[in-house]
Amino acid sequence: MPRVSLTVNGKPVSAEVEDRTLLVELLRETLRLTGTHVGCDTSQCGACVVHVNGDSIKSCTLLARQAEGAEVVTIEGLAAADGTLHPMQEAFREYHALQCGFCTPGMVMSAIDLVKKNPQGLSEQEIREGLEGNLCRCTGYHNIVKAIDAAQQVMHGKVKELPRAAAE
Amino acid sequence: MYEFTYHRPGSIADAVKLLAGDPDARPMSGGMTLIPTLKQRLARPTSVVDLSGIAELKGITVSGGTVKIGGMTTHAAVATSAEVQKAIPALAKLAAHIGDNQVRNRGTIGGSVANHDPAADYPGALLGLGATVHTDKRTIAADDFFTGMFSTALNPGEIVTAVSFPVPEKAAYAKFPNPASRYAMVGVFVAKGPSGVRVAVTGAGADGAFRHKAMEEALATKWSASALEGITTPQDTLNGDIHASKEYRAHLIGVMARRALAAAG
Ligand SMILES: Cc1cc2nc3c(=O)[nH]c(=O)nc-3n(C[C@H](O)[C@H](O)[C@H](O)COP(=O)(O)OP(=O)(O)OC[C@H]3O[C@@H](n4cnc5c(N)ncnc54)[C@H](O)[C@@H]3O)c2cc1C
Ligand code: FES
Ligand code: FES
C-alpha cells in the first residue's frame, strides 16, 4: 500500500493508505483523531472541515494522498499544550454556540479561517454568509454568529479578553 | 468508493501521457465534483490523474486586454485576485459566490468548465464574455465548447489548461442561487465589449448554458433594462426539475437579466 507523509497538528505523521482513502478516514480511523466528524455524503455539511496549508477544506472531499506533504490542523490541534482554548473555542463555550455539538468542530475550523482571512472585520451578515458551507441541524446559528463576532475581536487584537455573553 | 490508482504528474505532458494510455483514467483538479461522484459510485475510473502538482496550470495573468486564468486556479484565487477584481470585477464576484468557502478553496475553473454542470456559474461567464478555452492540444471558442448538459467539445484525455477572457467595457452577473446548494437556479451574465453585446444564461437550459439571442439583439440596439421589456424565453429548451419549473425559470431569466444590467451600469 502507498504511504502518505504529512504534518498533523504540528507532528510529522506517516501512514499506509489506499489510493481511495479520504483524508477524513486517515484522520479518524488511522490517527484516531475523531473530533473531525462526517455528517453527509454530498460535501455539503462541513462537519469534516480541517485546515490544509492554512485553508479550510472539507476533509471528506480530499484523498489522503492529496495531502502528501501538507500541514493539516484539526480541532484537536487548536488548544495550547497547557489546555488553554483557542479564542474561537472559548467563544463557542462562552456564547453557548452548540447544542448537540455535532457540527461544532467544523464550525470552529471554518470560523477561524474566515476570521483570519478578513482582518478588516466581518459584519453579522458577512459571518452568516461565510458559514455557507457549514450546516447545524440543531439550527443554533444565532449563538454561533455571536461567538464568531466575539472571537474575531480577540483574534484581531481589538480586545484583550473575550467579551462576556449577556446573562440570560 | 471503488478502487482506483492515484497519480500526481508534475507536467502537462506527463498527465496527457497517463490519460492517453488508459481510456478509463480521469483527470482531477479540485475534486469537488469528482470525489463526491466517486463516493456515490457514479463513476468507476481505473485511475485518477491529479493535476494539482502541475505548476504551469496555476496562476492569473492580465495583459493586452485579456485575463488568462490557469485551469488549476481555485475559485478563491480568482475571487481575491486584485488583478481580476480590477480588469473584470464581474468575474471575481461570480467566483466569490460559487458554493461556499471550502468549495472555493479547492474547486477550480478548469474542473468547472470541463464538467459543464448545467447549474454551474463559470459557463455563464465564458459565454457572456466570449472567452477562449485552452487545452493541451488547441484553443476552443466558448461558443463551440459547451455542447450539452455535462458535455463539452473536449476529446477523451484532453485537458483544459487555461481560460482567457477579453476585458469587457461593462459586465455583470446576477444569480438566483438554489438556497441549499448555492448552484444557480438561473444565472444571467451580460457584457458589452470586444465580443459585442452578449447575454448568457446558466442554470436554466436543458442543454446547459446558452446565449440569449433575443436579449442580445435588444441590448445591442439600446443598452438599457427598458430594452428587455416584453422579451420572453421559449420554455421548450429549458430545464424543469424539483427545484423549479420551466415556467419559473423562464420568468427568472428576465428578472436576473434586468438585475445584471442594472449592476453593469
Ligand atoms: C457543496 C458544493 C457546492 C457547489 N456550489 C457550486 C456553485 O454554486 N456554482 C458552481 O458553479 N459550482 C458549484 N460547485 C461545484 C464546484 O465549483 C466544483 O469545484 C466544480 O464544478 C468542479 O471543479 P473541480 O476543480 O473541483 O473539478 P473536479 O471535481 O476535479 O473535476 C470535475 C470533472 O472535470 C474533469 N476535469 C477536471 N479538471 C479537468 C481539466 N483541467 N481538463 C479536463 N477535464 C477536467 C474531471 O475528470 C471531472 O469529470 C459546488 C460543489 C459543491 C461540493
Ligand atoms: S462530511 Fe464533509 S461536508 Fe459533510
Ligand atoms: S449543534 Fe447540533 S448540529 Fe449543530
Image: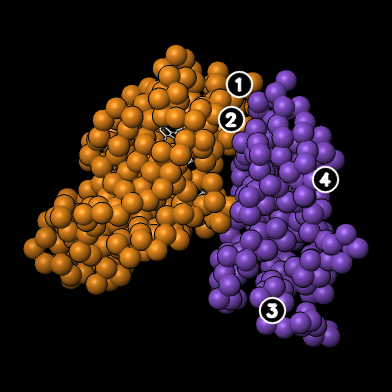
Chain colours: A purple, B orange
Residue mark closest to the camera, 2 vs 1: 1
Marks 4/3: CA–CA distance = 31 Å
Which residue: 25% across, 46% down? Answer: B131
Specify whether B132 is left or right of A141: left
For the residue marked with disc 3, what is the amino acid? Gly
Alpha-carbon distance for marks 2 and 1?
Answer: 10 Å
Q: Name the residue under label 1.
A: B4
Measure the C-alpha gap from mark 4 to mark 1. 26 Å
Q: Position of residue A3 (x, y in %)?
A: 72, 27
Nearer the observer: mark 1 or 3; the answer is: 3
At 66% from the left edge and 75% from the top edge, which residue is drawn? A156
Crowd tier of the residue under label 4, counting other residues whose Cα lies within 10 Å: few below 14, some 14–19, many 20 or above: some
For label 3, count other residues whose C-alpha is less than 10 Å away and answer few (under 14), some (14-19) or many (20+): few
**Label 4: which residue?**
A34
The residue type indicated by label 1 comes to: Phe
Residue indicated by mark 2: B38
Residue sitting farthest toward the right: A82
Looking at the picture, which amino acid does disc 4 mark? Answer: Thr
Q: In this view, does B173 lie above or below B195?
A: below
Specify the quadrant of the image occupied by residue B57: top left
Question: Secondary structure beneath disc 4?
Answer: loop
Mark 3, residue position: A157
